[in-house]
Image: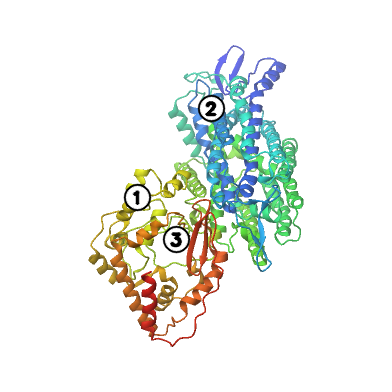
Amino acid sequence: MEAEPLLAKKGKGVVVVEARVVVPWGKEEEEEKRKKSRVGLYLQYLAVGIVYGGLPATLYGLFLGYLNVEGYVYSTAATIVSLPWSFKFCFGAINDCWPLFGYRRKSYMVLGWTLCFAALARLAIIKMPEPYWCVNASGDGYVKTRVDSSGATVAADPCNANAASSGGRFALWLMVASLGYCVSDVAADGLTVTIARSEPASERGTTQTTVYFVRTLGNILAVAIVGLCSSWKYEGTFSSWGIGFPTICGILALPAAIMIPCSWFLVDDRRVLEEEEEDDDDAKVVFPAGSPRRQYARRVWELLRSKAMLYVILFEMGYPLIGGIATTASGEVKSNWANVKTFQNSLFSVFGLGLFASGLWLVKSRFLHSSWRLMTLVTTVFLNLIDMPFSFLTIFDVVRNQYFYLGETVLLEIPSAANFVVATFVIVEMAEGGNEGIVYGLLTTTANLGSPFANAISNQLFRLFRPSLSNPANYIDDTPKFRRTVACSFALSYLASFASLVTLPLLPDQKDEALARKRKWPRRDAYAYITIALVAFGLVYSVTVNILAMFPATVCLRLAGGDGCSYACRWQTPPFIEAVTVSEFARSHCPQAFEHFTSGHRPLARAPAPRKVFITILRKPWKRVYSGLMHNFHDCRRLQRRVTIQENDMSRRAVAFFENLTNSDVAEYASCVGGCAVNMLVGRTCGAPAANGEVAWAVLAEFDFVGISDFWDLTLRLFSETFGVPVVKTDRLQLRSRTYSSPQKWIPAMLQKAHLVDNHLYDRAVARFLDDLERAAHGALDLGTARDDSIEKSREWTTDLIAPSMHGPGFITTFNGSEALVTYGHAQSSSSPPTTKKKQRRQPPSSRFKQRLRSRSSS
């Protein structure tokens, strides 16, 4: 057997290449030595297969079952876990240029497995939140649906809505584990390419298919473990037993721990020294390990200057980028409509991986010299045509069965294997002696980069579909309109997959054409700059968008695939907004949307100019102080620092502290923020010393509209009359549930009697409000029954649309008319009908409303 040596040293009668493939004079000794040198390499791929197969297999049960995240968050989590693969070229360059402890490969294998083990060990001991859904009475399943008053099946109320926003930390730890085994895999890939290049042209490709066959066996083992052992809480099939996500991570940590010593003692990686290149032409020394970094950089630059390399990079990135644009509905269809369980999902994945391994073997034995373009064309068309009937029959409720839906998994694996391995063949042909790691890393990076790039585009594209494809409640409602929306999203995905075939001319047809391109095609600096720009932009864009989708504070951004961070969605709203429309679906789009809606209190003087209209709605000063007091000394930093309590801290210690407030605590807080409204109008912050009240009133008098929150319904009608906008029922929703849980009844009484700086400003604002109402009453606006009507309607609307408080367990909001009454631990509902008054002589509008409102204002 002849070899193409990549010499690091030359001794008498023997040539030693980097991969320790020794070519002695005896053929049998050569074969035996080669087999022994590959044991450690195969173990690397087996361990990578176990972890690489096990971690993604946990995502379905964890994110869609236990945490019940939105569809686009689930797809992004899968992308985040595989994100380190997008940096393989960096790891490859480090492998090639910076030997660690004298070794280019095995040292990085040890380092990678150590990092992977540490991350998995952390996940094995992580504290899990409570599940999103409530557990049924028998304790073996979730309560996901309920029947409403009209008899329709709708989504049940969650027991822990916060679970849907806690998936980010799990995804990030999984990404760290993925980073570890990715570092090890890159080192193994460099060794694989070196060995493959030493094979005769007639056998080249055998090593790649073998190592990926071994890796697939590891995938099968890991997926079987996850499928057989997952608890029902993670969509497992068996209700009587099962293990949770942390335990599975502990199991996957074992092979990572075992590979730490195995990588050091079993991988045959020759120790390299910093040496000069040898002068012997017969030895064919081509860029040995330890060569200067500048020389390495020059050779890589020469590689990137090649038009042949640019074409391959464009294909490796463009094909998965276009073809990877896929609907964000696929996970929800699988979970809610096909009702796929983790065991069945893993079982079919095992069968599929077995067929994938068979496909690799088939390519190795039958199609090693077939046209790469033809194989890619046939497999792409075949994959999509098979997938279509399974998807559409499930979407339109013709057949909704998990075994039917999963049948496509088995059918698709053989063409998937052929499609996958073609991309690895071209890599070997593009590599040159000594830069195997960077070439393999660069080309697999561009291929892996296409997936997160496509996922980022998919999140942004499919968020435009309405009803929302990522809202689990829409799949439970299962309306005909929504089915058509989902079907359109799948059709668009298939169209994108077929469109990816336009990149086929960029791919060489076979080995001979690839080598001919390298020899004959021109080299220019422009090609290198284009390559670097493409990879850099793709990395920055995909990493940014996918990371944003993992954090609760940014998951709602349109850039990340959300529906936008409106004023009712978290903290991203601009402090000054010209118009606000509250939609009924805000609750489902933004968990906790009715709890966080502004980005803090900004003084008026900081409002960006120009602004044409200024409006404000004031509340009673004592109520505002009481609200801030019950929200952990809101806006009073000095008190928060003194008692070391954060703004939204709902720990037992914080709750206990506010249950035992003293008179001095309340007085100090009232002094701190009692002039907030006055300060905000003149450009100061809430906690600053109180400003001059006359100056504040002069500013307020110039406002176009002043409302009073205690008369909310009348404020809405007056606003509608003033600006010509209709009043919609969502305007009456109490978006931020009050959570006044204090058992000390003396606090509200004390604050009502307190001489707060804002009191005088509020009284004058009420007087203006009365005058504005009087003018409106003399116009076309009928205010005679506005308040009574709104009280009755608010009882109906708030029953289904008001979100419960998220501040902590035990806080329950109920409604009596348009006022919120909150107790700690239980709700007090008011079931008494509205009072029916006897007919009285109708008073003039001005005296009637002034009398009623002044009476209520003074209470």
- Looking at the rendered structure, the secondary structure element under dot 3 is loop
The three-letter amino acid code for the residue at tag 3 is Tyr
Cβ atoms at labels 1 and 2 below 8 Å apart: no
Horizontal and vertical percent position of residue 566: 46, 60
In this view, the residue in front, 52 or 474, is 474
Q: Which residue is mark 3?
A: 567
- First along the sequence among labels 1 and 3: 3
201 sits left or right of 98 in the view: right
Residue 337 vertical position relative to residue 127 in the rendered view, above or below: below
Q: Residues within 10 Å of mark 1 (few under 14, many from 20)?
A: some
Q: Farthest residue toward the top?
A: 12
Viewer can see residue 500: yes
Residue under label 1, please give it. Answer: 665
Image coords of residue 253 (percent x, y): 61, 31
State the residue in front, 467 or 599: 599
Q: Quadrant of the N terminus?
A: top right
SS at mark 2? helix
Foreground tag (3 vs 2): 3
**How far apart are labels 3 and 2 at the CA level?**
46 Å
Which mark is on residue 111?
Answer: 2
| Closer to us: 244 or 51 | 244
